[in-house]
Amino acid sequence: GAVVSQHPSWVICKSGTSVKIECRSLDFQATTMFWYRQFPKQSLMLMATSNEGSKATYEQGVEKDKFLINHASLTLSTLTVTSAHPEDSSFYICSARDSPYEQYFGPGTRLTVT
Amino acid sequence: TQLLEQSPQFLSIQEGENLTVYCNSSSVFSSLQWYRQEPGEGPVLLVTVVTGGEVKKLKRLTFQFGDARKDSSLHITAAQPGDTGLYLCAGENSSASKIIFGSGTRLSIRP
């Protein structure tokens, strides 16, 4: 089956610093990747849709200048949390699509901002 | 804004019992998926339903897509402790090209 990886799996950073999270589709090409965040005991909330070679489409309420998304190739998308604050601490999950109806999820990245 | 409401939010039952989880919306979806998520991991796809009225079976799990493609259900027969987890439905509107997740159902099966 299709495999999506994320790196790092967990990261701790200090308030005010920036953190980059990578999402890779390992055995397929993904024209579209999605970024979600999930708070404890809650469902996944879509942050943005990332299409290769074009600007990401952000969901309402998600600050595009704070959550920078780059989808430079068909197998890699990155999410950079700029000037992170403790309220940005969350579980960030990416997914990649290889067919019209199915998407495959990465294992997630737990971000803790101190 | 499309919303997917799942019910119940929490369910704790004894091993061997049956259960049904519901996923409802006022919006029509071109497809609907069910996922199961373990703590600290990404969701794992269980099934995708596309056609209104479609029923799919995966061992003890039965998935149904409503005729109007606005709702879905997941039925588990003879639940086992290994079924414990967070179950998420997710719907896609083809014109929007994005997948929206339901509120989630946390299932606990007691041995």
Image: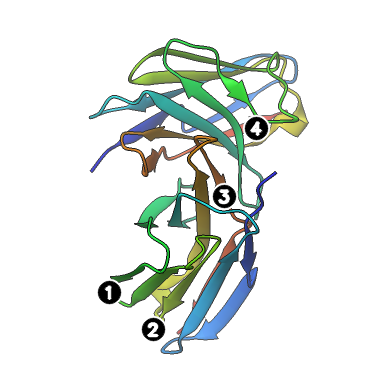
Q: Taking A11 as reference, is A100 above or below it?
A: below
SS assignment at label 3: strand
Give the residue pinned by disc 4: A112
Q: Taking A114 as reference, is B25 above or below it?
A: below
> Amino acid under label 1?
Lys
Say which chain tag 3 marks: B
Give the residue pinned by disc 2: B77
> Amino acid under label 2?
Thr
Give the residue pinned by disc 1: B59
Q: Position of residue B2 (x, y in %)?
A: 65, 47
Color style of the picture: rainbow
Residue B30 appearing in the image: yes
Q: Residue at x 68, y 17 (%)?
A: A64
Q: Position of residue A108 (x, y in %)?
A: 48, 38
Report the number of numbered marks. 4
Q: Position of residue A81 (x, y in %)?
A: 64, 19
Please identify, in this view, whether the residue under mark 2 or under mark 4 is nearer the observer: 2
Give the residue pinned by disc 3: B101
Q: Are marks 3 and 4 on the same chain?
A: no
> Amino acid under label 4?
Thr
Say which chain tag 1 marks: B
Residue B110 appearing in the image: no
